[in-house]
Image: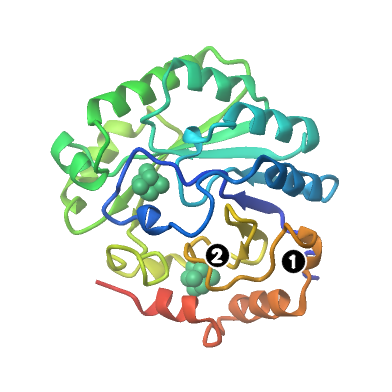
Amino acid sequence: MSPLDFPRSVLVETTLRCPADCIFCPNKKITDRPIDMPWELFTKIVDDCRGKGVTEFHPFINGEPLASPYLEDSLDYISRNLPEAAVHIYTNGYLLDDSTASILLRCRNVREVHFSIDGFSKQVYEQHRRGLVYERVIANVRSFLDRLRHHPERIATRVVFTMTPDNEGEVTAFRRFWDGLVDMVDVLPCDGRGGEGRLPAFMDAQRLGCFQVTDRTYILSDGTVVLCCKDWAGYTALGNVKDESLQSIWNSPEYRRLRDDIGQGRIADCEVCRRCVSDKL
Ligand code: SF4
Ligand code: SF4
């Protein structure tokens, strides 16, 4: 198959704001880029994607997307300019009150909503999602799911449980609770965030395989394009969309070579990948 000349999925760090301080997340360590992606940069990225066959747009990398001060405007801009792109929202659910839920439901491009919930009991949940309140998150998510039943568009839902040694014992109860309430229940081992997360990877997270690079690209809040979501610090900087088009960055010899190498299992040249695959508890 010939390599894509434009990514199918585009992930954009619209904000680094987040009310949580999860035990495995590097979010609070990121201090060297804008807390919110400048609006002009965001619209430039969407403009770069126009007419290029982008099928998924994720306004999220290392922050809580619902905390973006321009959430509604950004969804509206995507709808108007990338009508074929499905928007995927990944949220911790804490800010998903009625008004934020209405913003998501008004955007016809929102096709999937993923809730990150790493525990079945209040105690274990709040130990992992520090700063959030279990009852509020569950109430918000259940209320959103109720509203979806009367929503004319199909929106897929998924809960994601990041598994660590301290919540592993709640997996069965968690699955039992959420099965049937959402479309998918995923339990994923904590991945260690490229060997530089606050927790090392749990079990063999890499057995899940590395499918992060061949058709998707990641853009940090300052416009830096990086190889993979594990590279939260921006070590693999492949270009900046402030200075050139996303298409020319994606097709640069360096980016192409990295995608090729990783697609064929050759990761030795990439320090982030080397740390990612060797990091285990
Ligand atoms: S994992 Fe998500 S919810 Fe938790 S601190 Fe990071 S960005 Fe916030
Ligand atoms: S091996 Fe590299 S590309 Fe794959 S998930 Fe890890 S850091 Fe990302």
Report the Cα–Cα distance between label 1 and label 2: 13 Å
* Residue 168 shows up from this direction: yes
Q: Amino acid at mark 2?
A: Cys
- Quarter the C terminus occupies: bottom left
- Mark 1 vs 2: CB contact within 8 A: no
- Sequence-first disc among 1 and 2: 2
* Residue 186 shows up from this direction: no
- Quarter the N terminus occupies: bottom right
Which residue bears the numbered disc 1? 250
Which residue bears the numbered disc 2? 228
Q: What residue is shown at x 32% (from left), y 40% (from top)? A: 117
For the residue carrying disc 2, how many other residues have a C-alpha within 10 Å: few (<14), some (14-19), or many (20+)? many
SS at circle 2? loop
Percent x, y of residue 177: 27, 32
Q: Is mark 2 within 8 Å of ligand 2?
A: yes
Q: What residue is shown at x 64% (from left), y 78% (from top)? A: 258
Q: What residue is shown at x 79% (from left), y 36% (from top)? A: 81
Furthest residue to the bottom? 268
80 above or below 15? Answer: above
**In the rendered image, which quarter is residue 265 located in?**
bottom right
